[in-house]
Amino acid sequence: MNRIFAFVLFVSCTWSATAADKLKLLIVDGQNNHAWAKTTPVMQRWLTESGRFTVDVATSPAKGQDMSGFAPNFKAYDVVLSNYNGDEWSAATKQALIDYVQNGGGLAIIHAANNSFGNWSEYNKMIGLGGWGGRNEKHGPYVRFRDGQIVRDTQSGPGGHHGKQHPFAVIVRDEKHPITRGLPPMFMHAQDELYDKLRGPAENMTVLATAYADPATGGSGEHEPMIMTVGYGKGRVFHTPMGHSAESMQCVGFITVLLRGSEWAATGDVTLTEIPKDFPPADKVSVRE
């Protein structure tokens, strides 16, 4: 009898410890000029299947509706992932996000979430760089990789642009960071919008990887940031402009970066260090169904 009780207790404790190890992640969506209702479930699937996260979703009212009651409980989560690009939040909800990140919360910014809130200065500081939303040289410089180093280009011009969708190579520029450590120096990302000409404060920002926005596909002719981190108060922000569509999010490179970046934003480290066997090489796309 004692042995049976001990076994049950062991199994119970083992399950509880495993559950306790999971990070709580909140996806914020509900408005976006992209198909958020399709992309949120894709990200939720990859995050949940990793075994590292539990995932909840906070969906805002539709565009043009009353936003005053939209108040996600950010502080209940280890990391908040924004798949949101739409109407302004209330002042209280904005302040709640500021307080959450400043006090050590993690934030993940995916693709068009960097279009949001162009004139919200603290948001621009949190995400480092953004596009559209009225952004221009007053919001901060362009940031590019030139001649072996990151440069801040203060020339005038709008923030946010992309050429036609296409597969493109992502080049790791910081191989020592936990998000990119162990990744191949270059991998081919599936068809996506390659955001270029992003601009913003770029304070406490580290560019981990870039992609060349080829003029042949309508790009800027610059090596543009594709994976970034930002320090904001005690908090950590992971930002990738990749992820235009559900199909783009099936890229194994995107999935790997999403998982690693979200974990790093939550904890400051990455335990999901195994490189998937189907991780894309430099010259070939790899996607999952």
Image: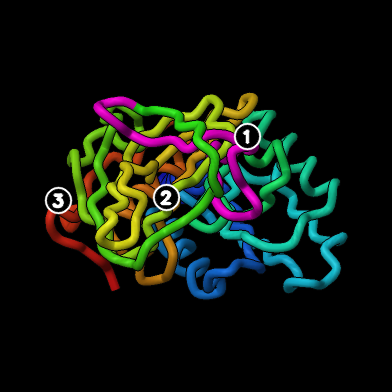
In the figure, 187 relative to 125: above or below?
Answer: below
Amino acid at the residue labelled 2: Asp
- The residue at the point 57 percent across, 48 percent down is 24
The Cα atoms of the two marked residues, 2 and 1, are separated by 18 Å
- The residue at the point 27 percent across, 54 percent down is 214
- Residue 282 image point, x, y percent: 14, 51
Residues packed near mark 3 inside 10 Å, few (<14), some (14 to 19) or many (20 plus): some
Residue 177 sits in quarter: top left
Tell me the residue that label 2 is attached to. 196
- Residue 243 image point, x, y percent: 42, 60
The Cα atoms of the two marked residues, 1 and 3, are separated by 32 Å
Tell me the residue that label 1 is attached to. 125
Numbered badge on residue 85: none
Numbered circles on residues, count: 3
Q: In front here: 165 or 61?
A: 165
* Outermost residue to the front: 156
